[in-house]
Structure formats: structure tokens, C-alpha cells
Image (spheres, rainbow, N blue to C red):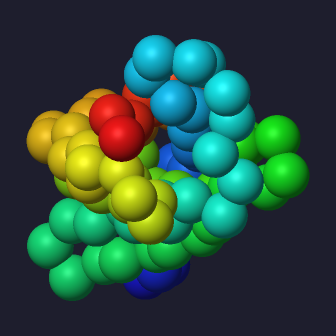
Amino acid sequence: MAVVFGQKSTQTVRGKVSDIESNSSLPGASVVLTRQGFEKATATDADGNFSMSGIEVGRYNVKVSFVGYETSELSEILVSSAKELFLDIKLKE
């Protein structure tokens, strides 16, 4: 009898966080990816970009916050094995 362990499909979630009115990037914004029993967080770089690799395929909730801005919450975002996911997130002051 052979035991075979399959490798889970993973993907990269990238994106940009910016101001909804001026379109200027928001460096240091908090980006949190969650689902049942899983949470991964990162912050945007100097250009408002973020990237999270090794994310298992499935549906996630995304919460983005920045001091002085309204928090944005995206529900049931699908991460698929076909291509990396890019999120263009605009926050309101």
C-alpha cells in the first residue's frame, strides 16, 4: 500500500492600496487575508503595493486599513490556481 501526499495549490495575492480621490498610494497600510482557521497580514510598501505568496486556493476575506481612512472589507474573494490575484483597493479618507 502506498501513501501519496498531494501538494496543495497555492497562488500569490498582490495589490495596490491608494486614496480614492487623489489616487495617491498609501504606504504602510495594513492588509489582512483571512478565512476559517487562517490569517496572513502584511503592510504596503513605499508605493502602496503589497504581495503575499503561498496562499492556498480558496475564498478569503480581505481587510485593509490605514490611519485616518475608513477600513475596507472585501468578502469571499476567490484565489484560484489559474493566475495570481491582483486587488486594486481604494480607501476613503
Q: In this view, does 36 lie above or below 37?
A: above
Q: Which residue is drawn at 14% across and 73% down?
A: 36
Q: Position of residue 9 (x, y in %)?
A: 52, 49
Q: Which of 31 and 93 is in front in this view?
A: 93
Q: Position of residue 3 (x, y in %)?
A: 47, 80
| Residue 91 makes an appearance in the image | yes
Q: Is residue 75 above or below residue 69?
A: above
Q: Which of 30 and 5 is in front in this view?
A: 30
Question: Please, which residue is most extreme toward the right here?
Answer: 46
| Residue 8 makes an appearance in the image | no
Q: Where is residue 28 in the image (x, y as percent from the top left)?
A: 66, 64
Q: Which residue is drawn at 69% across and 35% down?
A: 25
Q: In which quadrant of the rendered image does the N terminus lie? A: bottom left
Q: In this view, does 76 lie above or below 87?
A: below
Q: Which of 40 and 68 is in front in this view?
A: 68
Q: Is residue 23 above or below residue 25?
A: above
